């Protein structure tokens, strides 16, 4: 991957990594759907060792697709896995540092330098194993799991995310190891876009040119999950950033592959590469309240959701024209992109990939989506509202953050998401996270009002922000307890 090669597509299994047969079969489903790489969690040494059996089963079945081990908190598991699979993903926030406690960890410059040397010593064995075995390494930074050291000095910010990766990259580069991929992931599209732009700028300044993996963490499921993924991933692909993609949906992992393929096909072109990338749109930080309207076209005039006629500028372009338009870069009025699409999912992915950047950057006064295909009327207005919601430009309903599940998940997350949505969809403007485990849960709670997080078999932690206010609640009682907490908090306001 990287360079002029096509953008590669990957997904991650959600089976128990100790269950060889189930893991092999799910890997095959991902590969047959079009996955170029499959990632599996290896939370312990036993799971890492069993990757050898899974790899053997795949090779016996005739598949040579590379495998990646996903590591959190456990260098010993990483060192085992690196001898078996083609790639190991480590998280700088928890590889050499403890789980974040969200408590200030102030260090002098000399103390900070000493911490970097400690991290270097911890990384050296893995670097040597990867070098010997030809194993690639992904430095995978998550907004939800930065270390206390990074957050104290840089905040839980895009800059902090990029610095977290650059620190590890400098160590590896200094040891002559360059078989590196790097990722900046968040459930917030704006944070995801800004952190990747910051990373690429920092890499360029340091003469580093490593492939970048793109994804929105905890995107959710259904149309909302697809739209938020397309808005973030599509924005960066159209700017020429991104060498490999994963769409993280709370669904069967093989369902992620066609979604990723369509985003790449539309945003990066049929060749899988942007030949004339759009320049980044700088964020509009004027301080003014941003409240874009959704418009519909009626007899040549544009009316907002209240029926009020718009009298300002409207820019009407086909999707193809907009993708190559310089005029749109500085436009601040109502954008009216014209599509010709009969397939609902393709229309939604194309529109979000194309339009996400304008609302992430807080540019446009409003949006009217026109389609000459079969999807018309209210469906187009709903799509426009969904794009505004996905970019957090305008929140008009409850926002759900939910992870795609993996081998660490201890309950049926898809069913949990459905039940939480059914019980809380009336809470307009609230952000609720439903997470399969505590790896990213507490950190992603920082952007959520409440969280429902798997803690152990049949047990759930209930969060308010980053605070676990109820621990190890039986799953059968967890939803009722979450609702009680929300209702109690609202009564006190």
Image (tube, rainbow, N blue to C red):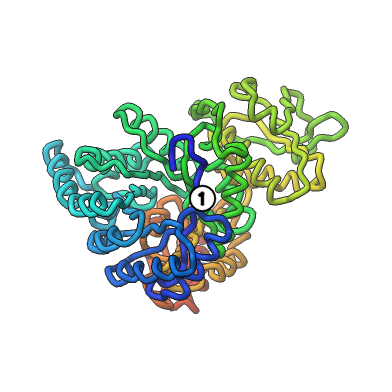
Query: Residue 266 vs residue 135: left or right?
Result: right
At a point 53% along the width and 43% down the height, the residue shown is 233
478 versus 441 height, above or below: below
- Residue 436 position in % (x across, y down): 44, 66
Task: Judge left or right: residue 324 versus residue 375.
Answer: left
Residue depicted at 64% across the width and 20% down the height: 327
Residue neighbourhood size for the residue with mark 1, other residues' Cα within 10 Å, grouped as few (<14), some (14–19), many (≥20): many
Image location (x, y in percent) of residue 312: 73, 23
Q: Is residue 403 visible?
A: yes
User: Helix, strand, or loop for circle 1?
Assistant: strand
Q: Nearer the viewer, residue 310 or 93?
A: 93
Give above or below for 322 relative to 168. Answer: above
Q: Is residue 314 above or below residue 353?
A: above
- In the picture provided, is 358 more to the left or to the right than 74? right
- Residue 94 in percent (x, y) is at 28, 55
The residue lying toward the viewer, choosing from 340 and 466, is 340
Q: Position of residue 466 (x, y in %)?
A: 37, 56
Quarter of the figure with residue 75: bottom left
Location of mark 1 (residue): 9
């Amino acid at each position: 991957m990287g360079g002029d090669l096509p953008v590669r597509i990957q997904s991650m299994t959600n089976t128990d990594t100790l269950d060889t047969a189930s893991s092999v079969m799910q890997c095959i489903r991902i590969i047959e759907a079009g996955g170029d790489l499959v990632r599996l969690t290896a939370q312990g040494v036993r799971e890492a060792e069993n990757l050898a059996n899974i790899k053997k089963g795949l090779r016996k079945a005739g598949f040579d697709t590379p495998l990646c081990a996903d590591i959190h908190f456990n260098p010993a598991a990483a060192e085992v896995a690196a001898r078996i699979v083609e790639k190991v993903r480590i998280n700088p926030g928890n590889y050499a540092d403890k789980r974040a406690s969200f408590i200030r960890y102030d260090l002098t410059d000399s103390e900070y330098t000493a911490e970097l040397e400690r991290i270097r010593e911890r990384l050296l064995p893995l670097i040597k194993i990867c070098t010997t075995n030809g194993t690639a390494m992904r430095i995978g930074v998550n907004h939800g799991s930065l270390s206390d050291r990074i957050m104290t000095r840089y905040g839980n910010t895009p800059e902090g995310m990029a610095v977290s990766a650059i620190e590890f990259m400098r160590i590896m580069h200094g040891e002559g190891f360059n078989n590196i991929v790097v990722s900046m992931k968040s459930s917030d599209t704006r944070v995801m876009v800004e952190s990747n732009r910051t990373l690429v700028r920092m890499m360029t300044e340091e003469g580093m040119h490593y492939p970048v993996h793109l994804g929105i963490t905890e995107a959710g499921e259904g149309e909302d999950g697809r739209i938020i993924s397309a808005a973030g991933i599509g924005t960066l692909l159209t700017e020429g950033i991104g060498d490999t993609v994963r769409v993280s949906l709370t669904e069967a992992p093989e369902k992620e592959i066609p979604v990723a393929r369509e985003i790449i096909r539309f945003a990066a072109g049929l060749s899988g590469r942007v030949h004339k990338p759009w320049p980044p749109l700088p964020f509009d930080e004027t301080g003014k309240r941003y409240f874009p309207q959704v418009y519909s076209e009626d007899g040549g005039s544009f009316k907002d959701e209240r029926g009020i006629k718009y009298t300002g500028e409207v820019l009407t372009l086909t999707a193809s024209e907009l993708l190559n338009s310089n005029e749109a870069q500085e436009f601040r009025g109502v954008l009216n992109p014209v599509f010709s699409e009969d397939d609902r999912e393709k229309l939604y992915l194309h529109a979000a990939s194309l339009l996400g950047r304008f609302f992430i950057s807080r540019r446009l006064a409003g949006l009217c989506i026109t389609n000459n295909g079969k999807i018309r009327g209210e469906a187009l207005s709903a799509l426009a509202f969904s794009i505004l919601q996905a970019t957090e430009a305008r929140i008009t309903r409850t926002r759900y953050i939910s992870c795609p599940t993996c081998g660490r998940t201890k309950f049926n997350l898809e069913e949990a998401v459905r039940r939480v949505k059914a019980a809380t969809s009336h809470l307009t403007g609230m952000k609720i996270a439903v997470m399969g485990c505590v790896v990213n849960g507490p950190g992603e709670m920082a952007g959520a009002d409440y969280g429902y997080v798997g803690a152990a078999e049949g047990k759930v932690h209930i969060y308010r922000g980053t605070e676990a206010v109820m621990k190890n609640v039986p799953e059968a009682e967890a939803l009722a307890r979450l609702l009680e907490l929300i209702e109690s908090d609202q009564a006190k306001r």
